Image (spheres, grey):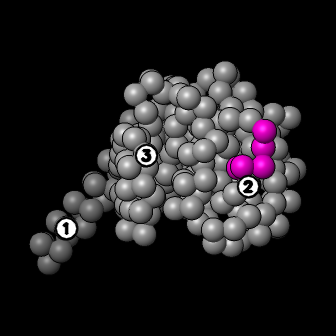
Amino acid sequence: MRQILNRRLWFLFLLKQLVLKKSYLYSTGWVESLKRGYPCENDGSEIPWMNYPLINLLKERLNRDLNLFEFGSGYSTLFYAKLVRSVISVEYNRNWLSLMDSKIPDNVSLIYREKDVDGSYCRSITEFNQEFDVVIVDGRDRVNCVKQAMGKLSKTGVIILDDSDRQRYSEAIDHAKKKGFRTLSLEGLKPSTGKLSKATILYRQDNCINI
């Protein structure tokens, strides 16, 4: 009986430590994200559903001189809009697109493309007569999105592939390496989730986020 009680006390102590205001889960907004049901900081400001080390890097390195393309719109779109000059985000879910359309600021353009493989979705980035400094690959058909994005990067452009720990995305990383890209992987918790998640930055020697 005493052993069971000790385990319960230890569990309560551990739980308390995790949600204290100085704890990692509290200070990053993990607890607040769980409470509100969307990825956010403690004040409710939207953040990407990506791991915290990557989020912190993006907060530090993105700036108003950069143009960003995003495969997969969401709360991340609102986050990027506050940090860069312009955002173009492609989405395949019409209902979600309608919801996001009511929230976006003036420097964001949302476009709809049907969910497909090696089709119009991954090629949506090629429709624009401009280059992009940052491409976020966090939607569908990610391997082909990475491949298409390479031809639309600025000279200092980078690609960020989320969930790069998934085996099916390894082809994208291998392809990038063959094209002369270097890789930097960051791993950590995502808002309101309990397992580690990895994201990989694909970059060249001179790049816009100085890595």
Residue that mark 2 sits on: 124
- Near mark 3 (Cα within 10 A), the count class, few <14, some 14-19 or many ≥20, is few
Question: Of tags 2 and 1, which is closer to the observer?
Answer: 2
Q: Earlier in the sequence, mark 3 or mark 2?
A: 2
Name the residue type under label 1: Arg
Q: CA distance from mark 3 to mark 2?
A: 21 Å
The residue at the point 49 percent across, 51 percent down is 161
Query: Quick one: SS at disc 3?
Result: loop
- Near mark 1 (Cα within 10 A), the count class, few <14, some 14-19 or many ≥20, is few
Q: In the image, is residue 117 above or below residue 143? A: below
Name the residue type under label 2: Ser
- Near mark 2 (Cα within 10 A), the count class, few <14, some 14-19 or many ≥20, is some
Query: Quick one: SS at disc 2?
Result: helix
Magenta stretch in the rendered image:
125-129
Q: Which mark is residue 179?
A: 3
The residue at the point 43 percent across, 69 percent down is 168
Question: Of tags 3 and 1, which is closer to the observer?
Answer: 3
Residue that mark 1 sits on: 7
Q: Quadrant of the C terminus?
A: top left
Q: Is residue 132 left or right of residue 112?
A: left
